[in-house]
Image (tube, helix red, strand yellow):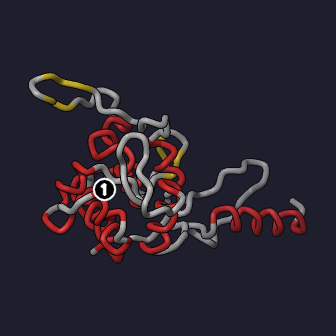
Amino acid sequence: MNRQLLIPVIMLLTLLTTSWKDTNRVIYLDSIVAEPPTMLNRGNLFVFMSAMAMRESNNTPNVVNRYGYMGKYQFSPKTLWALGRSFKVSKDEFLGNVALQDSAMVEYLRDNRNAIADLVIQYDGKWYNGIFITESGLLAGSHLVGPHGLRAYFDSSYTVNRNGRYVYPRTSDGNGTTVEEYINQFSGYSLTALQ
């Protein structure tokens, strides 16, 4: 193998994935099989939340979409109420308070982390449907479609009892964005600050 060709290709692959699980592993160009990164090192909780806000609302804190989802993270009023007393405020109060929106996001991430802890244990650091799964990607997916929608992505037979009727949770939002897109796009952030 031509060593002059190997080094630039390794550098390119490293740039594309940021870091490799085992930097001592050799990548052979004829097979193009590389170990997935265990931590893409894309940033911390703040960077993750900023990326989520950009995707959800173009980081616009006072926006309300056609479905009534509000703020830079696009929360439903029902979700805010479920998060607790601190978030039971008027629409105008919520839209006018960026710190409150950020606090709601942190609380929602913590709640979802607990709700999907078994999925994190089962899938974090593994490939699924051609996507490298990480905790941050799972939490982003859970933000998009809720914990039940995330579970339905991994188990197509998963149902939820709603008023005595079993239904299949949605794995995409009202705009057609799929949970798979979110899992992939938001993979690789370090969320240790959620402790």
Q: Is residue 38 visible?
A: no
Question: Residue 106's x, y, as percent?
Answer: 31, 68
Q: Is residue 35 visible?
A: yes
Quadrant of res 135: bottom left
SS under mark 1: helix
Q: Quadrant of the N terminus?
A: bottom right
Residue located at (60% from left, 67% from top): 20
Q: Is 182 rendered above or below residue 154?
A: below
Taking depth in this image into account, of 4 and 110 the one nearest to the observer is 110
Residue located at (90% from left, 62% from top): 2
Q: Is residue 77 left or right of residue 66?
A: left
Residue located at (30% from left, 49% from top): 76
Q: Quadrant of the C terminus?
A: bottom left
Taking depth in this image into account, of 93 and 195 the one nearest to the observer is 93
Question: Residue 80's x, y, as percent?
Answer: 23, 56
Taking depth in this image into account, of 5 and 191 the one nearest to the observer is 191
Residue located at (43% from left, 46% from top): 65
